[in-house]
Image (spheres, coloured by chain):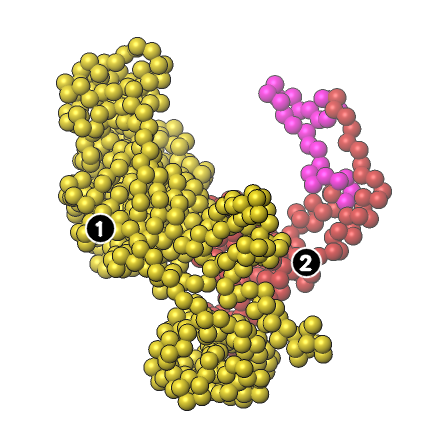
């Protein structure tokens, strides 16, 4: 015989405003084996918890049912409270009366109360079958993998390394720096992006706790929280990293010119090149798609090899795979910029002087293709009128529904830069839907732009036309004057937003980090766990989780690093005991569970039983997240989730049907 | 009533508004955030001062009484540019069509050209009758001169089907 206590929470008026909590508590008392049933304003509060703890002692309770909010919210709180009173924490059952009842049936209080009773009945029936479980402790690796070397990855790596953790920073490009390295100035202070980023890049390269792997990609992630095995593929640079001094002699003799993607293809680089003026590491790289020697595999060209005084060119370099063991992973792969050519009406790609805001950054940057002069990258003319058009690809159901969160501020900054660089010789128009200047110092920045005689038109043009002289014009209906205006501009800058990386699907699968509807990586909880993915030990930083500006990215990166430190600093972690277990005698070795497990937590082991070789499933405890997919799929019921075995679930179903079906659901 | 247009003392008409919105399932007008893209690109705007964004806002606020009897709903040339480009898939075209249907229902005055087009379709199956054209040599030619086949008149059953389609809403 068990002794069950039932505790119904009002959650202020969240539950009690709809559900008659007194009735529910009184009903609970009539259920078999229920010794105590009470209701209270806030069960999660200190007096609420004490109420349960005192009852455990006075009534000698051995099972606790708490009818309250979602278990995702306070299950841990209540388990801890129950454990403090000396009971095994897994003898607690949460019944969700808030998300499943009061919030879902706000307008039907009577029916809601009936549903609440039924759920409590099910909870009580299940509580009887709960088994005491113990958490297991496992040792963790004190190393962290950081994926992506943009400002998010750089910040997370530095924080982790300074805290004494060994960091492997993997960057796909030949240099770290990411998107921020391409920017000219940063809002709202207008300090130069390179000036604040480059010192951090150098710190990363010099830090004794950071192993920097550029031109590399993560190819496989195995293991579980605290113990991940990661394979990293280092693609060949065809340059010996130890010998290259970054003198750039090779880039001057190379005869092959290719578009420079760092400069948004507005300039050209050579087939052997240094990624950018501030590249870290400052080591040349040969592009195998463009290099004559590597493409034709013959003894052609080789000019760089002859010219290199350090003898660093090595056409025979091969890809290398490195294996590392890490405890946690920070995913900081960033985002991409919307391809404005998809919005055909704006003429991007068709009209030479319609450019994206990323291209504007490069022409405004002193190390860019125009040496920082604001001029058409195509014909070199200084524009007399610049028009900015906002929300290109964002807030648009045809492309991306979300607000890109940076476009408004980017345009304000670029408009200010244009005014500062061309002074009074340029008219500047900004066509916008809503101007969102929400951050610290951002609205002041907006005022600064207005004071610089920048014209704001709260409307978006439908299409852009090109005149025979290559100048551009568009009609826009101005809300302020109620007039249809025609704007003639010789440069149109499109406020393109941030979009998920094109290879984010691959990354999501690699790290088992799911994605939200907008395509970015999904955080474990939108408010309370914004730095973690749902996969234990995998943290998110920067624009891969959603569009972000630099201050927010840096804040999230430091937060993700702190989360990783929190997880790994003690050297061991506790694993939830709600895992799958295999009944070896029942397992037929059919491998269905192995194929279905989304966390790769099933291993097939062969063993010999009475001279016969048999294949059997085994659960890798650290990787199992207790989702139950295997248990539902197993044809012989050999694999079970602890605390959710068939009997425990079916008892609940029977209890659910007990009052509607005279047979008690049997 | 919580809202009054102080210029005309008009009040919103929730019932008519719901009637219009009911015809627009899946093309939710409420999503309009007044970016003015429709109005900026409207082909008919320059001719007749139709402001598509205003129509949407008026319907959203419930000031719909004047709309079906107004001339402005008939000036849309149905170029569908706003449908193509509306970032919120809430383009004014669909509401204009709904208003036209409502106007016919209310037996409001329909511009002559529309009635002519309908009777033309009913008789010949074509919205526009074949016309004579002038060639580069300045000769006026018609289909017979060009030895093009005669256009068949619609089958007898066509008129019945057409009338039935007109009656269905």
Q: How many marks?
A: 2
Q: Is residue A17 visible?
A: no
Report x, y in % for residue A32: 58, 84
Tell me the quadrant of the picture where the C terminus of chain A can be found.
bottom right
Residue where numbered disc 1 is placed = A165
Closer to us: A566 or B159 = A566
Q: Residue furthest right?
A: B156
State the residue at coordinates (57%, 55%).
A585
Front residue of A372 and A454: A372
Report the side of A266 relative to A519 (left or right). left
Q: Magenta span: helix, strand or loop, mainly?
A: loop
Q: Which residue is mark 2?
A: B104
* Labels 1 & 2 near each other (Cβ < 8 A): no
- In the image, what residue occupies the spot 33% across and 23% down? A288
Horizontally, is A403 left or right of A375 in the view? right
**Residue A26 is drawn in which quadrant?**
bottom right
User: Magenta residues, as a range?
Assistant: B122-146
Q: Chain of mark 1?
A: A
Q: Is residue A648 left or right of residue A461?
A: right
Q: Residue at x 46, y 83 (%)?
A: A61
Residue in view at x 60 percent, y 57 percent: A637
Answer whether residue A198 is magenta in the image. no
* Numbered disc 2: secondary structure: helix
| B137 drawn magenta | yes
Q: Quadrant of residue B134?
A: top right
Which chain does the red colour mark?
A: B
Q: Which chain is yellow?
A: A
Instruction: State how far apart marks 1 and 2 are (Cα).
Output: 75 Å
Compared to A39, does B131 lie above or below? above
Residue A635: image location, x then y, percent: 62, 53
Position of the N terminus of chain A, as image quadrant, is bottom right
Badge 1 and badge 2 in a common chain? no
């Amino acid at each position: 015989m068990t002794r069950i206590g039932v505790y119904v929470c009002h959650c202020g008026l969240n539950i009690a405003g709809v559900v008659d909590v007194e009735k529910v508590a009184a009903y609970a008392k009539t259920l078999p084996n229920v010794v105590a049933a009470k209701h209270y304003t806030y069960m999660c509060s200190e007096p609420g918890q004490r109420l349960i703890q005192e009852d455990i002692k006075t009534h000698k309770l051995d099972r606790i049912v708490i009818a309250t909010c979602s278990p995702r919210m306070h299950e841990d709180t209540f388990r801890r409270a129950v454990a403090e009173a000396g009971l095994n924490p897994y003898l607690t059952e949460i019944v969700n009366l808030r998300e499943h009842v009061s919030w879902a049936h706000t307008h039907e209080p009577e029916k809601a109360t009936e549903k609440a009773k039924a759920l409590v009945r099910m909870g009580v029936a299940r509580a009887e079958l709960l088994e005491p479980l113990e958490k297991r402790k496992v040792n963790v690796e004190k190393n962290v993998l950081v994926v992506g070397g943009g400002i998010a990855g750089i910040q997370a790596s530095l924080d982790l390394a300074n805290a004494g953790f060994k960091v492997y920073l993997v960057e796909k490009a030949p240099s770290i720096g990411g998107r921020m390295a391409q920017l000219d100035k940063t809002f709202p202070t207008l300090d130069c992006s390179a000036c604040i980023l480059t010192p951090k890049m150098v710190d990363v390269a010099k830090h004794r706790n950071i192993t920097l792997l550029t031109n590399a990609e993560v190819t496989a992630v195995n293991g579980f929280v605290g113990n991940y095995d990661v394979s990293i593929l280092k693609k060949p640079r065809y340059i010996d990293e130890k010998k290259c001094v970054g003198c750039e002699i090779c880039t001057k003799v190379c005869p092959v010119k290719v578009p420079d993607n760092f400069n948004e293809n507005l300039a050209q680089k050579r087939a052997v090149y240094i990624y950018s003026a501030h590249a870290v590491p400052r080591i040349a790289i040969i592009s195998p798609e463009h290099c004559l020697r590597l493409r034709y595999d013959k003894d052609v060209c080789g000019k760089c090899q002859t010219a290199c005084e350090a003898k660093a060119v090595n056409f025979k370099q091969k890809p290398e795979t490195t294996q590392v063991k890490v405890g946690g992973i920070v995913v900081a792969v960033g985002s991409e910029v919307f391809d404005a050519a998809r919005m055909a009406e704006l003429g991007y790609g068709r009209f030479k002087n319609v450019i994206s805001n990323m291209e504007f950054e490069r022409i405004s940057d002193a190390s860019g293709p125009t040496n920082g002069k604001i001029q058409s990258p195509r014909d070199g003319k200084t524009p007399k009128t610049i028009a900015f058009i906002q929300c290109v690809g964002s807030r648009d159901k045809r492309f991306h529904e979300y607000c890109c969160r940076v476009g408004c501020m980017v345009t304000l900054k670029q408009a200010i830069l244009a005014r500062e660089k061309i002074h009074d010789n340029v008219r500047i128009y900004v066509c916008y839907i809503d101007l969102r200047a929400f951050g610290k110092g951002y609205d002041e920045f907006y005022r600064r732009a207005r004071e610089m005689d920048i014209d704001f038109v709260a409307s978006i043009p439908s299409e852009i036309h090109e005149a025979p002289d290559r100048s551009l014009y568009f009609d826009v209906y101005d809300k302020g004057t109620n007039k249809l205006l025609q704007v003639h501009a010789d440069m149109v800058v499109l406020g393109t937003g941030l979009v998920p990386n094109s290879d984010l699907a691959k990354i999501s699968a690699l790290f088992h980090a799911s994605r939200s509807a907008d395509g970015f990586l999904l955080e474990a909880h939108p408010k309370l766990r914004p730095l973690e993915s749902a996969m234990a030990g995998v943290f998110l930083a920067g624009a891969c989780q959603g569009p972000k500006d630099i201050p927010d990215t840096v804040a999230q990166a430091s937060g993700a690093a702190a989360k990783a430190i929190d997880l790994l600093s003690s050297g061991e972690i506790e694993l939830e005991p709600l895992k799958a277990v295999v009944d070896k005698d029942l397992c037929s070795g059919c491998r269905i569970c192995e194929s279905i497990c989304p966390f790769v937590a099933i291993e097939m082991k062969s063993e010999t039983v009475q001279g016969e070789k048999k294949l059997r499933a085994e659960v890798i405890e650290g990787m199992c997240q207790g989702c139950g997919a295997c248990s539902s799929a197993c044809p012989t019921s050999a694999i079970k989730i602890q605390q959710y075995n068939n009997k425990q679930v079916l008892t609940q179903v029977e209890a659910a049907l007990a009052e509607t079906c005279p047979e008690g659901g049997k | 009533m919580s809202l009054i247009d102080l210029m005309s003392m008009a009040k919103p008409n929730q019932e008519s508004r719901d009637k219009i919105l009911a015809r627009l399932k899946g093309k939710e007008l409420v999503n309009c955030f007044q970016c003015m893209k429709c109005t900026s690109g409207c082909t008919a705007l320059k001719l007749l001062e139709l402001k598509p964004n205003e129509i949407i806002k008026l319907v959203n606020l419930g000031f719909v009484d004047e709309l079906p009897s107004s001339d402005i709903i008939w000036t849309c040339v149905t170029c569908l540019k706003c449908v193509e480009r509306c970032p919120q898939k809430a383009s004014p075209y669909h509401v204009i069509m709904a208003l036209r249907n409502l106007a016919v229902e209310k037996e409001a005055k329909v511009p002559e050209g529309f009635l002519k087009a309908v009777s033309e379709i009913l008789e010949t199956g074509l919205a526009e009758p074949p016309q004579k054209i002038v060639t580069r040599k300045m000769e006026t030619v018609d289909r017979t001169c060009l030895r093009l086949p005669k256009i068949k008149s619609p089958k007898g059953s066509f008129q019945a089907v057409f009338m039935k389609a007109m009656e269905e809403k």
